[in-house]
Amino acid sequence: MIVAIDGPSASGKGTLARGLAKALGFAYLDSGSLYRAVAAKLLAAGFDPNDAAVAEQVARAISPDDLERPDLRSEAVAQAASRVAALPPVRAALLAFQRDFAKRPPGATGGAVLDGRDIGTVVCPEAEVKLFVTASAEERARRRSKELIEKGESGIYARVLKEMRERDDRDTARSHAPLVAAADAVEIDTTDKDANAVLAIALAVVAEKRKSFRRD
Ligand code: C5P
């Protein structure tokens, strides 16, 4: 079974994806870390994240080890990731990695959970379960600034909200694989819900899907 989870940053999709993978015993891929790894490697080598030719080369050479880089979570890398993510050759280069993971999840598990922006629409349109996780921009900025402050970084709310809106705009407005809910996705608004409540909703969707499998 493939579970595809899409949504904007700080919507709670990563927490949900990890929780679901653990509860179901599935492998988990945070596809955003692929785009972040490309961006981090470009920035570290002094390249412009809008340089499509170099970014494509870097994307083609991405390995699982790159996803463990300690610099992936910075705001500078997040912004650069949404720039490289708008380049079609970069997206094409990262597609095989994601589809392989979904088809042959590591660890011989019974399935895979992938989260990102285009998992249900482009990477795994055949996924049995598709979830689209949202929350208000204000709530997402509040969560993100709390996270930054906990890490000892500057988390000024107004700046975080502004940068989040810029990234949302780039991710939804790009012509190639924009952030959009698949027509058959179940939408979960996490604005007023904690992680356990969101996980319970998602587990109910998975259980319902398994029941309909058995009926078919
Ligand atoms: O999910 P995360 O915030 O780590 O993703 C970083 C950036 O990578 C996003 O802003 C988006 O531009 C890009 N991304 C994407 N498609 C995905 C996952 C992430 O375009 N499937």
Image: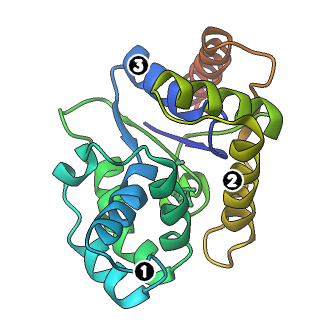
Q: Position of residue 172 (x, y in %)?
A: 73, 63
Q: Amino acid at mark 1?
A: Asp
Q: Amino acid at mark 3?
A: Leu
Q: Amino acid at mark 2?
A: Glu
- Nearer the observer, disc 1 or disc 3? 1
Give the vertical position of 91 relative to 201 (above or below): below
Give the vertical position of 164 relative to 149 (above or below): below
Q: Residues within 10 Å of mark 1 (few under 14, many from 20)?
A: some
Q: Is mark 1 within 8 Å of ligand 1?
A: no
Q: In whole angstroms, how far apart are the C-alphas of marks 3 and 2?
A: 34 Å
In the image shown, does 152 or 41 lie closer to the viewer? 152
In the image shown, does 28 or 129 lie closer to the viewer? 28
Q: Position of residue 59 (x, y in %)?
A: 31, 72
* Label disc, if present, on residue 163 of the rendered structure: 2
Q: Position of residue 183 (x, y in %)?
A: 76, 53
Q: Residues within 10 Å of mark 3 (few under 14, many from 20)?
A: some
| Quarter in which the N terminus is drawn | top left
Residue 124 appears in view: no
Q: Position of residue 207 (x, y in %)?
A: 58, 18
* Residue positioned most to the bottom: 53
In the displayed structure, does residue 69 sit left or right of residue 147? left
- Give the residue drawn at x 80%, y 40%: 137
* Label disc, if present, on residue 48 of the rendered structure: 1
Q: Disc 3 marks which residue?
A: 24
